[in-house]
Amino acid sequence: MKKAGLSTKRSKALADTFLSLGVAYLKQFTDKQLNAFRNQPVVIPSGKYRFFVGPYIVKGLEKSSWQVSYDGTTIHVFLSKVNALLFCLTDIKNNYQTSRDIIKWDSKLSNLLADLQHYEKNINTATKQGNNEKKEILLNRYIDAKLQQKYATSNLRKTINSAKYNNFRNLNNETN
């Protein structure tokens, strides 16, 4: 009976050793495969809300927030997945002007959306208080922010469309 007990313990230890070796091999294999695409403009989905794009990691925080990080450092939180992915692709392809424009217009748009929410809230409180002068000032600011939002949305859409065109055009003309 003692030998059976020792044999069971040894086989369990042996099984644990094989399991840990198997896990280490799979981790090493996965890291090797991901590193092969590290500097290439390839989008690798990892679940519903996570993508690897070259050296970047795009992670969905909320419905309208996508965080782009590089080596654990957050670069920017984008309003949409398309903006985040195209930023990564243009940056990998050394199209730095387009990637900076995407960040610039996305930041401008997110700031304007926050301002609009702030103005809406303050307009409602001014209306409840009966302060018409404050309400008029806030309405003018709200209208101005809406006009700026249209301009920023238009410029972001133009930048995104040109980035899409450049990325797809370059992929179709490659000969290697």
Image (spheres, rainbow, N blue to C red):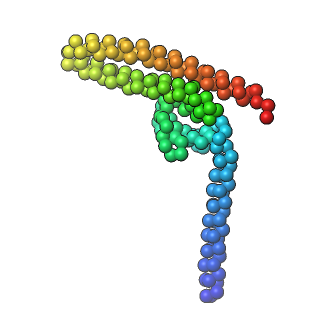
Q: Quadrant of residue 39?
A: top right
Please report the residue visible at 25 percent of the width from the left and 21 percent of the height from the top.
125
Where in the figure is residue 34, as x and y percent of width and height?
A: 65, 47
Q: Is residue 103 left or right of residue 133?
A: right
Query: Quadrant where the C terminus lies?
Result: top right
Instruction: Give the x, y percent position of residue 173.
Output: 76, 26
**Looking at the image, which residue is at 32% across and 20% down?**
119
Residue at 50 percent across and 35 percent down: it is 66
- Position above or below: 50 against 146: below
Q: Looking at the image, is 166 positioned above or below residue 134?
A: below
Q: Residue 107 at what x, y percent from top left?
A: 45, 27
Q: Is residue 53 above or below residue 24?
A: above
Name the residue at 68% across, 46% down. Answer: 36
At which x and y percent is residue 32?
Answer: 67, 52
**Left or right position of 167 against 153:** right
Residue furthest to the bottom in view is 2
Q: Is residue 80 visible?
A: yes
